[in-house]
Amino acid sequence: MGNRVQTIKSSKANFPRYLIRLTGYFSSSLLPPNKKFSSRIPVGCKLKHPILFIGSHGLFSNVHPLFAAKSFHFSTVVQPFAKMSQRDSYRLYTQFYDVIDLLKSSTARPSLVTATIAHCLAIKIGALAHLPACTSLLTAYSRAKYFISALALFDEFCDRDVILWNAMINAAVENKSYNVAMQFFVEMTEVGVAFDYTTLLLIVSALSHMKYLKHGKSFHCLSIKVGMLGDCSLCNALLDMYAKCGDLTSSQSMFTWMDCRDVISWNSMLNGFLYNGHPGKSFWCFREMISLGIRVDSMSLSCAISASAASGELSSGQTIHAWGIKQGYNFDISCSNSLISLYSESGDIEASKSVFKEMVLKDVISWNAMIGGFASNGMILETFDMLYKMQLTGYAQPDVATLFTIISLCAERMLLREGKTVHGFTIRRQMISDLWVINSLLDMYSKCNCIIKAELLFNAIPKRDLVSWNVMISGYSRNGYSKEAQSLFKTLTHQCLQLSFSTVLAVISSCISLDSLQFGKSITAGR
């Protein structure tokens, strides 16, 4: 566990397990009659968080008001468990399966509070000895984004079946710890647990996110060797992996070879062509689906609309829009989001506004599409007004994509004051650590002729990528700091980082004097 914890451990991640232990210490029904609270509390232990009390006074009797408010609906479900006697043999069977049902339901709407309470109740009646219950609790922690707690729970069990291993691998994939998922697969095989279709599917999914084509091919061969390639879901995962890794030839070969093509297989091809910059082929694939009588779904329509937008085919997109309304997909979020982008990129912002207004449910992507539409059409006031309305909703808050759009608009229009405001917003929302956001801010400051701010921000970046260097070199060149641009370029080459064509263009634009002419010649000569 040591290496895995080092990879993913964070200061806040220990809270759930800490809370569980303290809740156990302070629940009188968990203690033998001859024990007192003080005999169960570790020396020097102090309460730093509100504790959920489950005792003779009922659930949440001494809980913080905010905690209780968040847990109100869940408390109505759990309340009967607070009145349980101390493991009466008469009621033990019923209690056990009631808690099992509770653990399963906690995975549907996971949160720290629900997972913690379910864990406490499972400890109370000994339900954690039941592997399905343990699997449900592990899934609840994972979906609540407390992966370290799921990992700690997993490591407490010695007798693990393939379902529990799959749940842990899935937890790693869901929390974007793809290398950890691979480590679990290796450990699983080393201890002699046989993997199944689901295991391979999860690993292939992790490899597609990491874009490890070589490893993906190895698992393709492994699935053939063990005779598991007949599973349609696994074939679809391999097809998607090849597409995301940029190997469209293998993806098409896989698709042609498959006997069990379903709508997910077709959607993977649609998205694969679109993802690799072939919108025409993606749209052709959609038309092929229609001609073969394959029932399309919202994902198929969304890909086809996006392909129309990427190809600049507004009429095709409008045709799909009309066809989708007839098929009853006019209220689907993904289709509506694609339509907003289609009309915005075609310059028909009124149509985008109409689609957005008619949406019953909107997500972050919907708001981002509308904000991006206003920004791309030069409607500055409308862009910031939409950003303000987005924050008022409460359910859809600006993410990295939102900030990237806004910062890019500030850079393009040289809106320094607004750009500084957005910079402050990223700090308050703790989003300044995202390298994509930082690079956008660097570009904005340099284009607004505020090179000192850009320099301070660049020096504060703990781990820069090539884009960071390129933006800073370009900023120096644009603002007339030729020596600084060339010096930074030399520093970059000394660090043995791989240069790009953008790097060369950025530094060559600084060679505008006779003194720097020789430096420019040496770059173009490749020395």
Image (cartoon, rainbow, N blue to C red):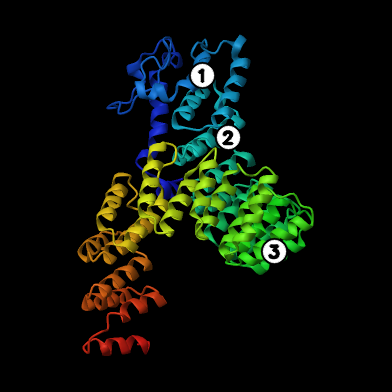
Give the image quarter of residue 409. Answer: bottom left
First in sequence: mark 2 vs mark 3:
2
Few, some or many residues within 10 Å of mark 3 (<14, 14–19, 20+):
few
**Please, what secondary structure does the residue beneath circle 3 have?**
helix
Are circles 2 and 3 on residues that touch, CB within 8 Å?
Answer: no
Against 97, is 330 above or below?
below
**Which residue corresponds to mark 2?**
135
- Between 324 and 425, the one lying in front of the other is 324
- Image location (x, y in percent) of residue 9: 39, 45
Marks 3 and 1, how far apart in space? 53 Å
Few, some or many residues within 10 Å of mark 1 (<14, 14–19, 20+):
some
- Image location (x, y in percent) of residue 89: 60, 11
Are circles 2 and 1 on residues that touch, CB within 8 Å?
Answer: no
Q: Is residue 245 visible?
A: no
Give me the disc on residue 284. Answer: 3
Which one is closest to the eye, mark 2 or mark 3? 3
Marks 2 and 1, how far apart in space? 20 Å
First in sequence: mark 3 vs mark 1:
1
Give the image quarter of residue 62. Answer: top left
Against 67, is 507 above or below?
below
Q: Residue at x 50, y 24 (%)?
A: 123
Which one is closest to the eye, mark 2 or mark 1? 1
Q: Residue at x 33, y 76 (%)?
A: 506
First in sequence: mark 2 vs mark 1:
1
**Please, what secondary structure does the residue beneath circle 1 have?**
helix
**Which residue corresponds to mark 1?**
78
- Identified by mark 3, the residue type is Trp
Against 454, is 6 above or below?
above
- Identified by mark 2, the residue type is Thr
